[in-house]
Image: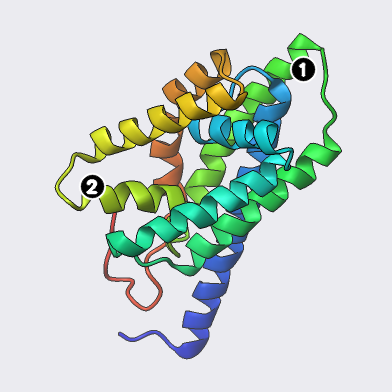
Amino acid sequence: MALSDATRRSGLTARLVQLIAGLVLFGASLALLVRSELGLDPWDVFHQGLSVATGLSIGTCTIVAGVVVLLLWIPLRQRPGIGTIANVLLVGLSLDAVLLLIPPTDDLVLRWTYLVVGIVLNGIATGAYIGAGLGPGPRDGLMVGFARSGRSLRVVRTAIEVSVLVVGWLLGGTVGIGTVLFALTIGPIVHRTVPAFSRDPVGDRSRNVP
């Protein structure tokens, strides 16, 4: 049975709210990881390295890198969604905003708290914005685009993340125990949060894509 226009609009509104909330929380989680000073995930090591090298804020570098990665989608014939564009803008803006609210600290207990809360919040936020089903993030889309050419997604993802990690570290990004802890735990967290937040495509409730 076809959905009414009102139901469609309501469903889309809910998905947009979930998308925006997820992306804002994602940026906030990155700010916590930055303030922990115990290590970042590979892409944010890269963003922080760019920030150190250029003097721009890490949020600005996140946005600029997102735009560049999105341009790389063109030869890969990837098509962005509204979630992709929102990802480029909102993550960097919320990252910088939350960094203004949370000052650096030398308190090791507080830094570990930032790290653990940041990782858990990152997993929840990832589930929320992916579950909204309005388009992948630019970096995820890049990996999928390369994998479509016949390469293993696991190999492509590993190659890209190792590359940005090394470049970011050389530029001055923070690599540490937090980087390892993030790598070991974020997968299991997202494995649970993506299905928990997943929404059926608007107008096609009969299809349930895992």
Q: Quadrant of residue 159?
A: top left
How packed mark 1 is, by other alpha carbons closer than 10 Å (few <14, some 14-19, many 20 or more), is: few
Residue 206 in the figure: left or right of residue 136? left
Front-most of 168 and 54?
54
How packed mark 2 is, by other alpha carbons closer than 10 Å (few <14, some 14-19, many 20 or more), is: some
The mark found on residue 147 in the picture is: 2
Residue that appears at 49% across and 54% down: 68
Which is closer to the viewer, label 2 or label 1? 2
The residue furthest top is 108
Examine the rendered structure and indicate whether residue 176 appears above or below residue 68: above
Image quadrant where one finds the N terminus: bottom left
Examine the rendered structure and indicate whether residue 71 appears above or below residue 156: below
Instruction: Locate residue 118, reporting x and y percent.
Output: 63, 31
The mark found on residue 110 in the picture is: 1
Q: Quadrant of residue 28?
A: top right
Q: Compute the Cα span from label 2 to label 1.
A: 40 Å
Residue that appears at 77% across and 17% down: 110
Residue that appears at 33% across and 37% down: 157
Instruction: Locate residue 58, reporting x and y percent.
Output: 68, 40
Which type of secondary structure does the marked residue at label 1 adopt? helix
Tell me, yes or no, if residue 137 can be seen here. no
Residue 119 in the figure: left or right of residue 183? right
Tell me, yes or no, if residue 172 can be seen here. yes
Which type of secondary structure does the marked residue at label 2 adopt? helix
Instruction: Locate residue 3, reporting x and y percent.
Output: 39, 84
Residue type at mark 1 is: Leu
Q: Earlier in the sequence, mark 2 or mark 1?
A: 1
Residue type at mark 2 is: Ala
The residue furthest front is 54
The residue furthest left is 150
